[in-house]
Amino acid sequence: MAMNALLSVSDKTGIVDFAKALHALGIKLLSTGGTAQLLAKEGLPVTEVAEVTQFPEMLDGRVKTLHPKVHGGLLARRELPAHMAALKEHGIDTIDLLVVNLYPFEATVAKPGCTLADAIENIDIGGPAMVRSAAKNWKDVGVVTAADQYAAVLAELKAAGKLSDKLRFALSVAAFNRIAQYDGAISDYLSSVQFEDEKLSEDYVPERALFPGQSNGHFVKLQDLRYGENSHQQAALYRDLVPAPGSLVTGEQLQGKELSYNNIADADAAWECVKSFDEPACVIVKHANPCGVAVGKDAHEAYAKAFQTDPTSAFGGIIAFNRTVDKAAAEAVVKQFVEVLMAPDFTAEALEIFKPKVNVRLMKIALPQGGKTNWEQGRNAIESKRVGSGLLLQTADNHELALADLKVVTIKQPTPQELQDLLFAWKVAKFVKSNAIVFCKNGMTMGVGAGQMSRLDSARIASIKAEAAQLSLQNTVVASDAFFPFRDGLDVVVDAGATCVAQPGGSMRDQEVIDAANERGVAMVFTGVRHFRH
């Protein structure tokens, strides 16, 4: 018995060639509306669904496939005599292949100035209904919901005259996933709309809440991981349906063992930090904290400076560059034990140098092209954190400090070099776990104190690390991710050698701390913004 295929697509990419291939295989083509017109125009014999249902499309195309002759043909179980008898009694033919993609709801609501009416009109009803019917009856019906599935479907039809159970089931899973994503997008949009009764006209562009009444996150699994943070935990890596350009999950692993849970977490911290610099930079991360950050004239110089900050912590760390790793940089890095090395690219010579180091993971990640929006710059819009049976959502910390934002609050003024180092230190502090204290000089971290319950202890640790690395903190600048609630925080960094301090300001004791800075003869600037990173 000849197969019947129903084609009804909003996005018509590749549909003509696909339909021609189906026709060549002797498959009867059914279609609707614009798809039917397109296929007929290409000379293909196509039967309109309205002919099958004996009921015309109506309500501006809102009703065309919502009919027993369509859904009966999709849902009937071929192995059940009662089902087949019911089809025969009512003159319903089976539909063996369904090709449907949905009205472009997501693309519509993403457009600036999208009206509520336009959003509502682009909610597909008949398409998802057919997809669900076909996907539910996967043993008998192949359901195609994306153009990138056409090739696999044709290959099996040409080879065996039918689809395998394995492919039909995979297509069914993909179909239900697509419906879930589609419904989630509708829910996200509608539950974010600030409803205004008197404004419900065709040109009404609703105000939308930043955080919808229901959040429907959808993520695609990239891989199972060997274990989680610890060996007794299980884990997997997922990505956003549409990842930000230049984000970690868009990267390609060129070499080495499979990335672990901790590798991925640390790699993300390193990559997000290094791509925030415009000049050639290197970031070395250990346990999610930068332990060495520097800029230089090239990748090699940036690495040499970053490594110098804390060679002990750098052992077994994660290293990220925002420039191509060349021979010189590779020869320097290969001398130490490194877990993951990331860069926008590697020269052929660099790859050869690391070839014997079979366990070293090399990750190639394209930098974002850049643009006006955070997204174009490769930054996430929203960050999430799981709490007990709940989810914290917030806008990502994408604040960039400019020189003009700095407010000098002391008698002593920072020098031009100190101002540049302050901006550098502030950028690093943003990626260091709170409480963060970062000493810098000449585009290089000189001491990093992270994650302590007391800012004083973070400062002392930074000083201890600098001493261990034989680095002097004399005449350094220091950045603190939050204000100094008492003067003791300022005193401890000045005692260590800092001559210039950047902090958010905003404490009830700001004046006390300013007076202390004047007393100690150091410069201090307020940034007006904090960067807690818990």
Image: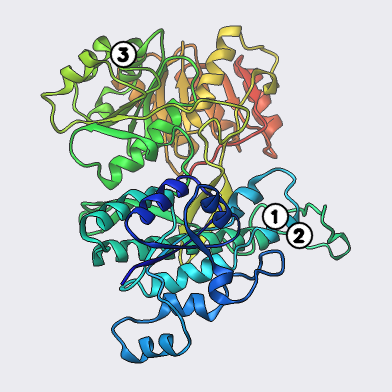
Q: Amino acid at mark 2?
A: Gln
The structure residue drawn at horizontal position 40% and vertical position 75%, both measured from the top left corner, is: 94
Quarter assignment of residue 333: top left
Q: Is residue 144 above or below residue 237?
A: below
Q: CA distance from mark 2 to mark 3?
A: 54 Å
Residue 37: where, in percent of width, then height? 58, 54
Under circle 3, the secondary element is: helix
Residue neighbourhood size for the residue with mark 1, other residues' Cα within 10 Å, grouped as few (<14), some (14–19), many (≥20): few
Q: Residue furthest left?
A: 356
Amino acid type of the residue that numbered disc 3 sits on in the rendered structure? Ala
For the question of whether residue 238 can be seen, the reply is no
Mark with earlier residue (1, 2): 2
Circles 1 and 2: CB atoms closer than 8 Å: yes
**Where residue 501 is drawn, which disc sits there?**
none
SS state under label 1: loop
Q: Which numbered disc, 3 or 1, marks the residue that appears first in the sequence?
A: 1
* Residue type at the position of mark 1: Ala
Which of these two is toward me, 12 or 383?
12
Q: Secondary structure at mark 2?
A: loop
Residue at position x 71%, y 43% in the image: 112
507 or 75: nearer the viewer: 75
Name the residue that disc number 1 marks.
209
Pair 3/1: label in front: 1
- Residue under numbered circle 3: 304
Residue that label 2 marks:
194
**Callout 3 crowding tier (Cα within 10 Å): few <14, some 14–19, many ≥20:** many
